[in-house]
Amino acid sequence: MGELSSYFFARGARLAGEQLEDHEDLEELSKTADREGMQSLSYTQKAKVICFRLLRHTRFFGILLLASVSCSPRIQKKNNN
């Protein structure tokens, strides 16, 4: 539930009309993906664009969805050792 405070801070800033620097960078990356296609982006950039678009459309429920996704079993085993 640690994601909730970030959500409410971002929502408050949006309602106040402020833009976050990271938001501007992600918006530009999303526009680049629209212009040049997703093929022109690295895997990391593609993941950022996909998450940004998901969160832009689903807002709070997108945060809950992304927060509930567990790591792969290999990563979980590595962390348990």
Image (spheres, rainbow, N blue to C red):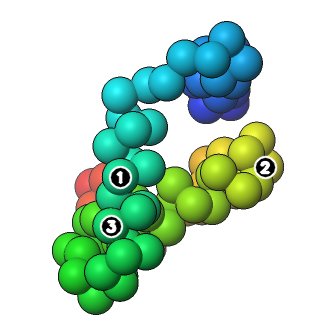
Question: Where does the image place residue 72, in percent across and percent down from the top left?
Answer: 44, 72
Q: Which mark is residue 28?
A: 1
47 is higher (above) or lower (below) than 64: below
Give residue 5's position: percent from left, percent from top: 64, 19
The numbered dot on residue 32 is 3
**Disc on res. 61:** 2
Q: What amino acid is at disc 2?
A: Phe
**Which residue is at 24% across, 75% downward?**
41
Quarter assignment of residue 36: bottom left
Q: Quadrant of the C terminus?
A: bottom left
Q: Amino acid at mark 1?
A: Glu
**Which secondary structure lies at badge 1?**
helix
Give the Cα separation between the discs numbered 2 and 3.
26 Å
Q: Residue at the spot x=52%, y=55% of the render?
A: 52
Element at badge 3? helix
| Label 2, residues with CA under 10 Å away: few <14, some 14-19, many ≥20 | few
Earlier residue among tags 2 and 1: 1
Task: State the residue at coordinates (73%, 45%).
Answer: 59
Q: Is residue 18 in view?
A: yes
Q: Quadrant of residue 46?
A: bottom left
Q: Could you tell me if the residues under marks 1 and 3 are in contact, i.e. CB atoms within 8 Å? A: yes
Name the spot of residue 1 as percent of width and height, x first.
68, 30
Quick one: SS at disc 2?
Answer: helix
Q: Are marks 2 and 3 in contact (CB under 8 Å)?
A: no
Residue at far front of view: 35
